[in-house]
Image (tube, helix red, strand yellow):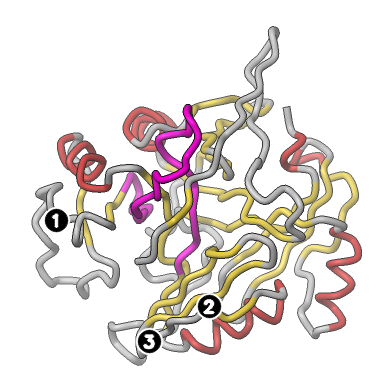
Amino acid sequence: MRTAILALAVLLSLPTRPAFAQLVSHPDAPVRIGHYHLNVTSVEAHQKFWAGTLGGKALKFGSIDVIEFPDAFLFLHVQKPAGPTRGTAFDHIGFAVPNVPAMAMKLAAAGYQETTGREPKPGEKPPATSGTSAVYGRFAYFLGPDGAKIELVTADQKGDPPGAPPIVAHHIHFINKQYVEMQQWYMKAFNATLRPGQTDFFIGADLPGVGYSLNFFRWEGDPSITHVPTAGRVVDHVGFEVKNLEAFCKELEGKGIKLIRPYRKRDPAMNNIATATIVDPWGVSIELTEGLDQIR
């Protein structure tokens, strides 16, 4: 796993209520990862994992419970998920931290299950929950409540400014037997570029003006498996923040990508910011937003 550059988080506050930090990294990029929408059995269990253990910040957005990390928000919707991330083509959320083994030991001590990049098949023995098996000390994988999977990668501390946050939302990782085709679809949809260094089981795509963003693993399980849609699962959909969303939606339609939910200039469900929805060919739901970084 290549080294990540940890971003400086500028945390804003209001005297009358908690405020959201803006998506501060790469503010001029046309497309950035912005949020994840989770279906959860227990808000308290997820707050303990994402905020109490990982170090995010629990907030309220109207009546919605939100976990804030530098550069991404997690929206928690109380609805028993149809299943974990495993079984969908959305495999995990990546976070950058200064010390992967230390965070892995913290997660293991709190009782969370350590796993692998390509998890064992159902019925196979999982890896030991030791908290010390972070590969080369640089990355590790864990399962949170409802089977939400994360990866920890090592942040590059050289040149990080004083006060840099201890954890930053870093990348999305997909898993698919058609991992090359999936990478090509995301390059087409989001004008991403091929990352050098692909292998026979891994390939990357980088969002313009952002860099390291989207990763794709080859599926190692049953080759007959067809991934189920993410809608209704623990990670229901991923969100991308887009500049000039209306024009971007027209560009997607020009590429033959159908809008499942058309462009809305003001979406009441998202504090009247602009939204639209698409679904990739493997069933990953994607919400597009414009103005997420202005939510207070």
**Residue 201 lies in the magenta stretch:** no
| Pointers 1 and 3 in contact (C-beta within 8 Å) | no
Judging by the rendered image, the residue that carries numbered circle 2 is: 195
The answer to whether 259 is drawn above or below residue 22 in the figure is below
Judging by the rendered image, the residue that carries numbered circle 3 is: 199
Horizontal and vertical percent for residue 147? 33, 53
Depth order, front residue of 22/157: 157
Circle 3 crowding by C-alpha within 10 Å: few under 14, some 14–19, many from 20: few
Magenta range: 144-173
Judging by the rendered image, the residue that carries numbered circle 1 is: 133
Mark 2 or 1: in front is: 2
Horizontal and vertical percent for residue 92? 41, 60
One can see residue 83 in this view: no
Helix, strand or loop under label 1: loop
The residue drawn where x is 79% and y is 63% is 261
Q: CA distance from mark 2 to mark 1?
A: 27 Å
Name the amino acid, label 3. Thr
Horizontal and vertical percent for residue 269? 75, 41
The answer to whether 202 is drawn above or below residue 149 in the figure is below
Mark with earlier residue (2, 1): 1
Circle 2 crowding by C-alpha within 10 Å: few under 14, some 14–19, many from 20: some
Q: CA distance from mark 1 to mark 3?
A: 23 Å
